[in-house]
Image (spheres, helix red, strand yellow):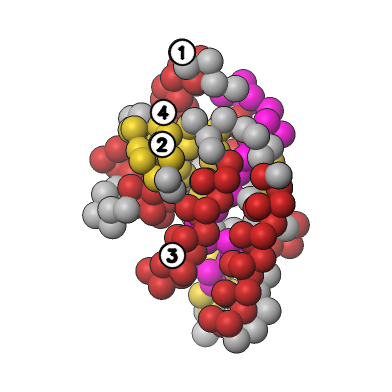
Amino acid sequence: MKKQELDATNQLYQDKLQKYFNDEVSLVFGDGNVDSEIVLVGEAPGKTEVEQGRPFVGQAGKNLEEFITILGIAREKLYITNVVKFRPVKYSSDTGRESNRTPNKEEIRISTDFIEQELSIIKPKLVVSLGNIALRCILKDDKTTIGMLHGTPIDVKFAGGSFVLFPLYHPASIIYNRALKDVYLQDLLKLRDYMNNKSLH
């Protein structure tokens, strides 16, 4: 049942984006166990994710595997998605290459309804937001930052339901800022303790 509801929501999102961009867009939809009590929400897919059609399979995905190992849970038991389900890119005039960029406000705006619908279908008990974009989208607060709230469980009412939000730095952030690695690992251990205390798996 959930799978059919998600498929219908994904089709609406695809139709909306096709009209918005006036073109076909490569999308990377949520992936994993639709009955999971735990959902991970990231920012947007990158190049590898678009190529493979799954979230978190590139370099950030390698960090995510380490993350999942620390939590002691199999990836197949989780549901993993992004706020924006297409790859935002910027082009270099010097090299002619494209690279990832942070989604802009308009890209987030046209995607917010769909992450709300997705979470209302899954009905998780715990949502782990990865980075600022997911955190701000779920809290509906553009001014909050991951630096203020990382590693702290927050009771949230969202998408017609309620769950605990556990904000973490994005796994990609420790690729660019190695100084965050210790904080990130400490937050993961806090998350593991929280999950064990609440018997979430």
Q: Is residue 29 above or below residue 127?
A: below
Residue at point 30%, 42% (across, down): 147
Q: Position of residue 172 (x, y in %)?
A: 51, 48
79 in magenta = yes
Taking the image as shown, residue 89 lies to the left or right of residue 183, namely right
Would residue 172 be seen by someone viewing this image from the given angle? no
Disc 1/disc 3 C-alpha distance (Å): 34 Å
Q: Which mark is residue 197?
A: 1
Crowding at label 2, few (<14), some or many (≥20) Cα neighbours within 10 Å? some
Q: Is residue 127 above or below residue 194?
A: below
Crowding at label 3, few (<14), some or many (≥20) Cα neighbours within 10 Å? many
Query: At numbered mark 3, what does the secondary structure look like: helix, strand or loop?
Result: helix
Q: Give, as a three-letter code, the residue at label 4.
A: Asp
Disc 4/disc 3 C-alpha distance (Å): 26 Å
Disc 1, disc 3: CB below 8 Å?
Answer: no
Which sits earlier in the primary sequence, circle 2 or circle 4? 2
Taking the image as shown, residue 133 lies to the left or right of residue 88, namely left
Q: Give, as a three-letter code, the residue at label 1.
A: Asn
Q: Position of residue 42 (x, y in %)?
A: 51, 49
Q: Give, as a three-letter code, the residue at label 2.
A: Ser
Q: How many marks?
A: 4
Disc 2/disc 1 C-alpha distance (Å): 19 Å
Residue highlighted by disc 3: 108
Residue highlighted by disc 2: 162
User: Which quarter of the figure is the C terminus placed in?
Assistant: top right
Eye-nearest disc, 4 or 3 = 3
Which sits earlier in the primary sequence, circle 2 or circle 1? 2
Quadrant of the rendered structure where residue 106 is?
Answer: bottom left
Which sits earlier in the primary sequence, circle 1 or circle 3? 3
Q: Which residues are magenta?
A: 69-89
Taking the image as shown, residue 170 lies to the left or right of residue 139, namely right
